[in-house]
Image (cartoon, rainbow, N blue to C red):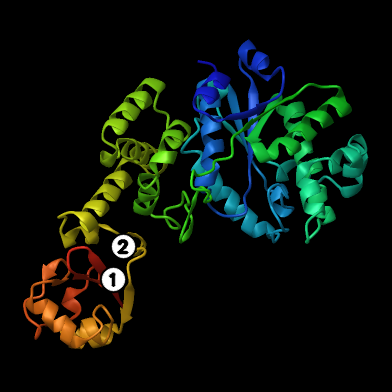
Amino acid sequence: MSFVEELRWRGMLHDIMPGTEELLNKGTTSGYIGFDPTADSLHVGHLTQIMTLIHFQRAGHKPFALVGGATGMVGDPSGKSQERNLLSEDVLQHNLQSIQAQLEKFLDFDSGANSAQMVNNYDWFKDFSFLNFIRDVGKHITVNYMMAKDSVKNRLSGDTGMSFTEFTYQLVQGYDFYYLWKHHNCALQMGGSDQWGNIVTGTELIRRKDAGEAFALTTQLIKKADGTKFGKTESGAVWLDTARTTPYQFYQFWLNASDADVKKFIRIFTLLDRETIEALEVEHDAAPHQRALQKALAKDITIRVHGEQAFDKAIKSSEFLFGNTGIEFLSELNDNEVIGLFEGVPNFKINKAELEQGIAVLDLLAAKTTVFPSKSEAKKTIQGGGAAINKSKIASPEAVYNADALINGKFIVAQKGKKNYFLIIAE
């Protein structure tokens, strides 16, 4: 199956410039996608483009991942209602190194002729003076052409307007394409559908400046069936960096995909073949409550992003909260993972020095914290066997807990009933 055919059946393809498919069918083609280094991690919103590059390489083509060290200093206005803050060179360098490390998990940088290659547009812009840029690049693209782009028109008609810096962004990105076409034989730029205007500016610059030919392809922007933004949770973006989003939280994000979304997501975000996916769909439709598609999606993508060990830990984390896994499991987690596991669960901070002296359980649960609204309710629940500390039933309302109860020297897990968890953090 060709690259374009692969994108089509997976529902990823949005726009394709005439002649692109013919070019790709002739043999190995070099193509690129740009990644914005405004943070030190990619997030799940970038995964569509990562998957596009994976399919591109698997089809025998050579993928370039352009990390925008220069354009990150400017800011792309596409799809944005206001100008973003610009980043310092030191912050950008840190972000670039982190993103490169993440992309290396997905693309093969040592596969011969079609090895993936990382490029940074700062390398060719750092010594490009403003005067040389407007002479060598700016004269080839008219203001009329630039004003016709939706990303420009939408901002100009809005309340915030558009700075000259952002207005020139499409020229800067267009020159990226020209540079890669000229120096790396890169004939194709790919990106999300909101990038079409910027991409064709590049093809136009190549045509006008050197009478060359280049091509464009865009993928669908991912939208959820309920209208909410893909890749966002109540706590914010879902990141690929474990320090920002733990593997358990990452796994749960995909596991919680709705039935309306999961058939689309499993095609876009996994490398499972058509036969496997269609068989899973039959299984899912026969018993939707078993969530066969969600489980297959969450497993595939968690393993590819974080590895088998992290996936196993995510499963154990789920079993800890919803099954019979013992409290000793928490000792396998670092502090960030423990806090991530109990995201959305009420948590309280207590004084560690006080705990070392010993705290009566009624004080611990109804005075130092508000696991229970009152000591009388705490006492009644404990007497009825409905309260637990670290997954062990509290033996008596007169029980006293000290630092020996701390997990990893920091945490106590309280339960009210089987499913109501509370995290107590001793500091």
- Assess disc 2: are there few (<14), some (14-19) or many (≥20) residues with their C-alpha within 10 Å of its C-alpha: many
Residue type at mark 1?
Answer: Leu
Vertical order, 401 against 312 (above or below): below
On the image, numbered disc 2 is attached to which residue? 338
Residue 126 visible from this viewpoint: no
Q: What element carries label 1?
A: strand
- Specify the quadrant of the image occupied by residue 88: bottom right
Residue type at mark 2?
Answer: Val
Q: Is mark 2 on a helix, strand or loop?
A: helix
- Quadrant in which the C terminus is drawn: bottom left
Q: Which of 10 and 129 is in front in this view?
A: 10
Q: In the image, is 268 to the left or to the right of 93?
A: left
- Residue 260 in percent (x, y) is at 42, 40
Vertical order, 359 against 113 (above or below): below
On the image, numbered disc 1 is attached to which residue? 423
- Specify the quadrant of the image occupied by residue 160: bottom right
Residue 88 visible from this viewpoint: yes
Vertical order, 357 against 150 (above or below): below
**Residue that appears at 45% across and 57% down:** 244
- Assess disc 1: are there few (<14), some (14-19) or many (≥20) residues with their C-alpha within 10 Å of its C-alpha: many
- First along the sequence among labels 2 and 1: 2
Badge 2 vs badge 1, beta-carbon distance below 8 Å: yes
Q: In front: mark 2 or mark 1?
A: 1
